[in-house]
Image (tube, rainbow, N blue to C red):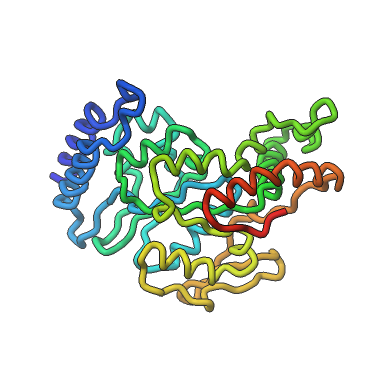
C-alpha cells in the first residue's frame, strides 16, 4: 500500500509541482503552492512509514558547497550525530534538469530512511555555483538551513585541478599541467572554470537574493582540516542539534596527515582520494593567483560580515 501511495504521489509531483522551467522569470520564487504540496507529500509518505516508524523525508538541511571545499569531510563528521540521517550520494536534484524535471517525489526517493526526530541532510557541492539552484531550493522550503564550507580560494583551485588530474590518471588518459590551465598568452586565464568557482562573492550574492545570512552557516574549511571539533560544534548549534559530537570522536592520523573519525570504537578515515598532494606550482604564478583573489575575497568578507585567514 505504501509503495502504491508513493508511486501515485511521485506521478502527481512530476506532472504538477516542478515544471522544467517557470512560465515567467522569477515564477519559482516563493511558490506557496509548491511549499504546501511539499508538506502534503511529506505527510502522506509519513502515513505510509515503515513499521519501525522510519520514513524518507525531504532534507531539512543541505550542504550546498563548495566543490573541493571539504563537503565530504563535513558530511561524515556531521553523520557522527545520532540525530542526523545523511543521503549517501550527491543527489544533483536542483542543478541537473533530468533530475529536477522528475519532481519532488523523485527527490524524496533519494533520501535515507530516518526517524521522525532525525534531521535529513544531503550534500551536492555544485549547488553553490549553479545559478538556478537558490530559487529552486527556496521554492521547496524557504525555511531550510544551508551549510556552506569554504577554503582559501587559491587552495581550492589547486584541489579542483588535482581531482580532475587524478581522474584522468586512473583512466590512463593524458592531462595538461596546471600551468596550461592557469596561464594563457602570458596572463592568468580568467576563463578557467576552477577560478570562477572560487569567486565566492559572485555566487553568494545569488544565494542572498533568496536566503538571509541567518539561514546560511559558513564553515571554515581550512580550520575544519586543522582542528575539526570547534567547527562541528558551531554546526551543531546552527542546526539546533543537541551537543552529541565530542573531541574524542576525532584523532589525527599521522600517516594520512589529517584527522580521522572514531565512532562507537570504530575508526574510519576519508577515502584515499581525499587529501592528495597538490601539484608543484611556480611561486610567481602562485602569487598571481593570490593577487587575483585579493579583491574578490574582500568583497566576500563584506558580504557575509566576517573574515577568513586566506592569502
Q: Is residue 87 visible?
A: no
Q: Percent from the top left, x then y, of residue 2?
A: 16, 46
Picture residue at 27% right of the left edge, 51% below the top: 56
Residue depicted at 55% across the width and 47% down the height: 66
- In the displayed image of the protein, which residue is found farthest to the top? 23
Who's the residue at 17% across and 49% down the image? 43
Please say if 308 is above or below 80: above
Q: Seen in the image, is 256 located left or right of residue 45?
A: right
Q: Residue 130: percent from the left, percent from the top?
A: 49, 35
Residue 118 in view in this figure: yes
Q: Going by the image, does 223 lie left or right of 25?
A: right
Residue 101, image quadrant: top left
Image location of residue 302, percent across then percent down: 57, 50
Q: Quadrant of the N terminus?
A: top left
Relative vertical location of residue 111 with respect to residue 23 in this rendering, above or below: below
Residue 226's image quarter?
A: bottom right
Please name whichever residue, 204 or 47, is drawn nearer the observer in this view of the structure: 204
Question: Camera-side residue: 279 or 129?
Answer: 129
Q: In the rendered image, which quarter is residue 256 located in?
A: bottom right
The residue at 54%/71% (across/down) is: 229
For residue 134, side relative to residue 247 (left or right): left
Numbered marks: total = 0
| Residue 137: percent from left, percent from top | 36, 41
Amino acid at each position: 500500500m505504501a509503495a502504491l501511495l508513493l508511486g501515485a504521489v511521485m506521478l502527481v509531483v512530476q506532472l504538477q509541482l516542478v515544471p522544467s522551467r517557470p512560465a515567467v522569470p522569477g515564477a519559482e520564487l516563493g511558490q506557496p503552492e509548491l511549499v504546501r504540496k511539499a508538506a502534503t507529500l511529506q505527510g502522506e509518505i509519513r502515513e505510509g512509514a515503515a513499521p519501525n516508524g522510519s520514513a524518507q523525508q525531504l532534507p531539512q538541511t543541505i550542504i550546498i558547497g563548495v566543490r573541493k571545499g571539504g563537503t565530504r569531510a563535513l558530511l561524515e563528521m556531521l553523520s557522527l550525530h545520532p540525530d542526523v540521517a545523511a543521503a549517501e550520494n550527491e543527489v544533483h536534484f536542483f542543478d541537473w534538469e533530468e533530475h529536477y524535471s522528475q519532481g519532488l517525489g523523485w527527490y524524496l526517493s533519494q533520501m535515507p530512511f530516518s526517524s521522525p526526530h532525525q534531521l535529513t541532510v544531503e550534500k551536492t557541492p555544485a549547488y553553490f555555483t549553479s545559478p538556478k539552484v537558490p530559487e529552486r531550493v527556496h521554492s521547496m522550503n524557504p525555511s531550510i538551513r544551508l551549510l556552506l564550507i569554504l577554503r582559501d580560494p587559491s587552495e581550492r583551485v589547486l584541489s579542483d585541478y588535482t581531482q580532475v588530474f587524478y581522474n584522468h590518471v586512473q583512466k590512463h588518459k593524458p592531462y595538461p599541467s596546471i600551468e596550461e590551465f592557469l596561464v594563457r598568452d602570458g596572463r592568468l586565464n580568467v576563463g578557467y572554470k576552477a577560478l570562477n568557482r572560487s569567486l565566492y562573492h559572485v555566487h553568494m550574492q545569488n544565494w542572498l537574493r533568496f536566503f538571509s545570512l541567518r539561514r546560511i552557516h559558513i564553515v571554515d574549511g581550512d580550520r575544519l582540516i586543522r582542528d575539526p571539533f570547534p567547527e562541528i560544534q558551531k554546526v551543531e548549534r546552527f542546526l539546533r542539534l543537541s551537543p552529541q559530537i565530542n573531541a574524542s570522536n576525532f584523532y589525527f592520523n599521522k600517516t594520512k596527515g589529517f584527522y580521522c573519525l572514531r565512532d562507537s570504537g570504530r575508526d574510519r578515515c576519508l577515502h584515499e582520494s581525499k587529501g592528495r598532494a597538490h601539484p608543484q606550482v611556480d611561486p610567481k604564478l602562485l602569487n598571481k593567483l593570490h593577487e587575483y583573489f585579493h579583491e574578490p575575497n574582500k568583497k566576500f568578507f563584506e558580504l557575509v560580515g566576517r573574515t577568513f585567514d586566506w592569502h
